[in-house]
Amino acid sequence: MATVASLPQLDERCIVAEAQTGNRAAFEELVRRYDRDVLRLALNLMKRPEDARDVYQEAFLKVYRNLHRFRFECSFYTWLYRIVTNVCLDHLRRRQARPEDQAPEANGGHTDEGITDFFERQREHRPTLDPERRLFGKEIQARIATAMERLSPRERVVFEMKHYQGLKLRAIGDALGTTEETVKNSLFRATRKLRTQLGGLR
């Protein structure tokens, strides 16, 4: 059994193996190594901090309960990523089933990593924007957020992972436990729906 002091020096495979034997400190080391990545991914996909925290807790609970099933056929991070994205999909489906949750959250100028980053990058090139244009930018953000909410959960997750996390289709398929062709079809449908809903934007 590894000592608590030696855990940070061990490679991922050794720590996972230790955690699988029931070493609680080893599992806590895994959480410490990946907690920021998990929370960032949850925020990117869910947009709402409270939903991201729920995903974070549920995902690590699933990891803890299913760690004995991990067979080192992929990296631990890939396996963890798959669990987080599937938990996000479940939450998005539940959110979509509740009409009162359809309206996107107004974030009061705070921008999480994700869809609003596009507009922040655009504004960097035009620092002298007048208030009217700034207001127009916020209206565009709201329209895109609303359009994203109207995608199916899988379409939304695929679109986010492709365009805001820069993942290749094969990597998205691995994360979602599906084929590259299925991911491509979901991305096509998402893009077509967004173009239809945002057709008036210039």
Image (tube, rainbow, N blue to C red):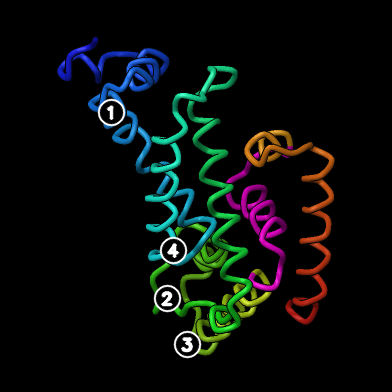
Residue lying farthest left?
Answer: 5
| Magenta extent | 149-169
What residue sits 42% from the left and 41% below the top?
A: 37
**Main SS type for the magenta part?**
helix
The disc, 1 or 3, on the residue closer to the chain's N-terminal end is 1
Q: Secondary structure at mark 2?
A: loop
Give coordinates of residue 201: x percent, y percent. 73, 78
Tell me which amino acid carries mark 4. Answer: Asp
In the picture, the disc for residue 51 is 4
| Residue 40, placed above or below residue 65 | below
Q: Which residue is mark 2?
A: 107
Marks 3 & 4, CB-CB < 8 Å contact: no
Label 2, label 4: how far apart the Cα atoms are: 14 Å
Image: 149 above or below 167: below
**Which label's residue is closer to the chain start, 3 or 2?**
2
Amino acid type, residue under disc 1 in the picture: Glu
Residue toward you, 158 or 57:
57
Give me the residue at 74% from left, 39% from top: 178
Between the C-alphas of marks 3 and 4, the distance is 32 Å
Mark 3 lies on residue: 131
Q: Residue 47 at x, y = what percent?
A: 49, 64
